[in-house]
Amino acid sequence: MAFTDYSERASRMIRRWSGVRDPPRKPSQQQELPRVCVARRPPSLWLPALYRVALRLASLWRRIVSLAPVAKLLCAPAAEDESSQPAPFQDEYVEPARSIPVSDTCDVLVVGGGPAGLSAAVAAARAGASTMLIERHGCFGGCITTVGMETLGWYRYEGVVECETGIGMEMERMAARMGGTVKWPFNSSECLDADYFKIVADHLVSDAGVKPLLHTIVVEAIHEGGALAGVIVENKSGRSAVRAKRVIDCTGDADVAYLAGARCTKRDRRERMGVSTVFSCSGVDKQAFIDYTETNPATYKTWSRRGGEWCQQTADKEEHLRSPFLQEEFEKAIAAGPGVDGTDAAELTRAEMEGRAQTLHAIAALKHAVPGFEKSKLRNFGMQVGVRDTRKIVGRYDLVGEDVRGEARFDDSVGIFPEFVDGYNILILPTTGRYFQVPLRCMQSPDVDNLLVAGRCVAGDKVSHAAMRNMMACTVTGQAAGTAAAVSIREGTSTHHVPVDAVQRELVQQGVRIS
């Protein structure tokens, strides 16, 4: 088969570009080879041609570069104005405006994949809304999977009253069926396997038809018509927008609410609860340790034996109950102290590094003082420190300690939670059957419509926060927020005007106890 001599054609083209004219071609020369069209030349033919073209282009480029100084002198202004000089780098940088793609759209967008976010996403999907769940880590589960706090509710001593059929309890039962739990040693609570719960969370999301998106953070809120209409996210794919009819903030830190302009509060640094570094050990003689705890039993009264940070105000009825707390053994090995601002990246960095350093002292203390730990060694850390206390929204109703301690009842109740208070040196365990109702209004910001907040950043004072921050309480507000978001779309209203009775009917249909 004959081929057109493309190398010669390319050579002629380069010569013409450089101003060299070839002698006229004779007609007989043009007819020496027939015209043949091919889709791809064999490498043995087109590589040499490309090499010769490259040499010609390089020669032409050297000529152009040699003329550049002359062109610069001819085009330069007589004097350069000082105002044309770039401004020195300031304390602030104005980011240029740009268009970004809309990567996803949905009815309900849930930000934060912890117990609150999982409950919100599953509830919204079950109520008929197309739902998306965004999480900044590589797994769902929140404090369970990223911090290593392996229980949704460790408070289940005899006498507790709570909702037995909400999504939070469903999480525990699913984990138990999949072999991812063990019995809490001192009451009827379940301990979760943190790594196994990642799989449990994946099943919950997949079974409900929720669209997941991991490794993604929200960096800005989108407003339209005076209401929240989505968020701007960043991840490995770049920066994009997610449009949503309703947004639920389950970040724990009220990040989305804050970005959207909702008023938020934070406790004074001196009152703020501490953060914790959670670690696991291997090489522990489990039976020797259990025998030690049986012969040296600790109770909740032990927490207050020596005063200080762990001194607890109780209702007396808790003081005889068994506790896993090892105060004496850890006196010199506190992993992290109070005063860390969980919304400040620099302070979180310091807490993470200090917590890991202090863990070595904690393990040394265990080896020295606790039977069973003589041959122990560090196995792993949680993915991040456990944060208890950051922003809370200002709500349409702010829960107070009297609501939690006084069995409050509300017309807009969307769930119940037992009288369990754990924080700010107060410990009340739910052993009397007392419980309070959770109002929808504590999840609504008066400043931003079509936004709901669930988890530990719902509105309230510090005593109510010591109750609502607990993970099972977070599932209560999460399921309520997801349901309310879906119902508001179904009813054609905003989250500020969603009919409470319709939300309550949907929650009851999902098995939630609201009274």
Image (cartoon, rainbow, N blue to C red):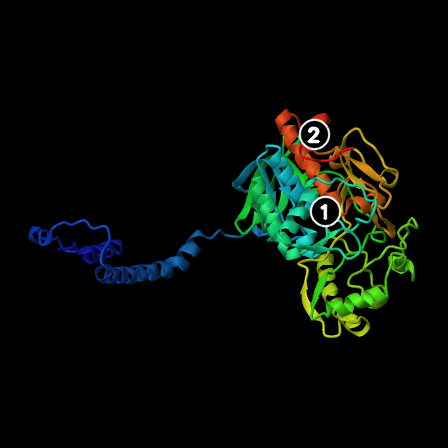
Q: Amino acid at mark 1?
A: Asp
Residue 504 location, quadrant: top right
The kind of residue tagged 2 is: Val
Q: Is residue 230 above or below residue 378?
A: above
SS assignment at label 1 = loop
What residue is shown at x 63% (from left), y 36% (from top)?
A: 124
- Is residue 222 or residue 141 the one in the foreground? 141
Specify whether 7 is left or right of 363: left
* First in sequence: mark 1 vs mark 2: 1
Closer to the eye: label 1 or 2: 2
- Number of callouts in the render? 2
**Residue under circle 2?**
503
Residue 431 appears anywhere in the view:
yes
Q: Quadrant of residue 473?
A: top right
| Secondary structure of the residue carrying numbered label 2 | helix
Badge 1: residue crowd in 10 Å (few <14, some 14–19, many ≥20): many
The percent coordinates of residue 479 (x first, y second) are: 69, 38
Where residue 381 appears, as percent x and y from the top left, is: 68, 63
Q: Is residue 456 visible?
A: no
Foreground: 61 or 188? Answer: 188
Q: Which mark is residue 253?
A: 1
- Density class for disc 2 (Cα within 10 Å; few <14, some 14-19, many ≥20) is many
Q: Residue at x 62, y 50 (%)?
A: 200
Using residue 436 as the reference point, say whether residue 193 is left or right of it.
left
Placement of 17 over or under 110, stated as above or below: below
Q: Which mark is residue 263?
A: none
Say whether residue 241 is left or right of residue 433.
left
Residue 375, x across and y down, in percent: 72, 74
**Quadrant into which the N terminus falls:** bottom left
| Side (left or right) of 254 relative to 434 | left
Image quarter in which the C terminus is found: top right
